[in-house]
Amino acid sequence: MSADGRRTRTWRSAWRGALRKPLCGALAAGALSAGLTMGAMLAPTACAAYATSAASNVYQPVVQEPRAFGYLLGDVLTQRILLPSGENGWGAVTPPSIGRTGDWLERRPARFETDAEGRRWMAIDYQVVNVAPTLSKITVPALTLTTASGATLQVPEWPLSIGPITASDAFNAGDLQLMRPDRFAPPIPLAPLRRQASIALGLLLLTLVAWAGWWLWRNWRESSRLPFARAWRQMQRLDGPHADTSADAWLCLHHALNEAAGHVVHAGSLPGLLARAPYLQPLREPLEQFYRQSTERFFTPAAAITPAAPYPLRGLCRDLYRAEQRHQR
């Protein structure tokens, strides 16, 4: 190669090197700038994710808040919180407590819902239980929910407005008053009550008549069947000043005692009567006296009878009849 050719080749190489150095520097500077820019974009996100998941373990879930206006007394608003999926291993989320959350809202029991995409939501209803005389701003309280794995879901508060049903300046206009008179209870129809009372009274009277008729029938049946009842009825027919001394009265009582014992009774066989009719045991002494008086009356000569006071025959017959009644009951 000639000297001119070598000079031309050297000049071209130097020119290409001069052009190549700025271009490479620019490309290197651009790559460095792009790398720093991407690092600046990714670094906060990565750092934030790390701080949330590793350092504090507190998460802010997706929340569907209720509308922020137009609520009156008694209205119910619903807040929905997206729960973490079971794949993260967080487990169940403990629902918040129920009851009043302040002056305005009352929290109801939470319920769990699943949307069309299979995501689980916690729905919490709040009812407006108090309003101010004017339009007021309140907040749905913030929530801190804890999962079974120990993670915490932080739900921020949500502002909304509530208002009275009627404006305060509308009172005392026409029939709209601050205080209305007491509302009287509607009158109760009395005709059905009177009819029921008449039926009840009629049934009561029928029951009393039936009971009285049964009582009279029982006494009549006993007076014709029981020996001392028949004797007492006959004794009442012999009423008079000399009923206790009448022979018929004495014979009537003797017949009743014989019928009660099932055999003829005299003073010596009185224990047999008391054994057959033990309800007469309290009247043992009056019966012994009755048989002594009867023996003197019917088997002792008139000249040997010592005058004595009249024997109370009616009283003994009445006592025997009452003892018989108690025994039958």
Image (cartoon, rainbow, N blue to C red):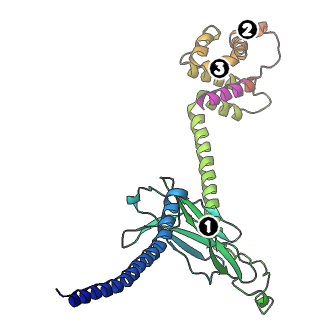
Asked whether, in this view, residue 25 is left or right of residue 294, the answer is left
Q: Residues within 10 Å of mark 1 (few under 14, many from 20)?
A: few
Tell whether label 1 touches label 2 (CB within 8 Å). Answer: no
The three-letter amino acid code for the residue at tag 3 is Leu
Which x, y percent locates residue 301?
A: 73, 8
* Any part of residue 254 in sight: no
Membership of 328 in magenta stretch:
yes
Q: Nearer the viewer, mark 2 or mark 1?
A: 1
Residue type beneath disc 1 = Ala
| Dominant secondary structure, magenta | helix
CB within 8 Å, label 3 to label 2: no
Mark 1 highlights which residue? 142
Look at the image and give the residue range highlighted in magenta: 316-329
Mark 2: which secondary structure?
A: loop
Q: Which residue is mark 2?
A: 301
Q: Earlier in the sequence, mark 2 or mark 1?
A: 1
In this orientation, which residue lies closer to the viewer: 79 or 300? 79
Which of the numbered marks, if any, corresponds to residue 280? 3
Asked whether residue 209 is in view, the answer is yes
Q: Quadrant of residue 283?
A: top right
In magenta segment, residue 204: no
Of mark 3 and mark 2, the one earlier in the sequence is: 3
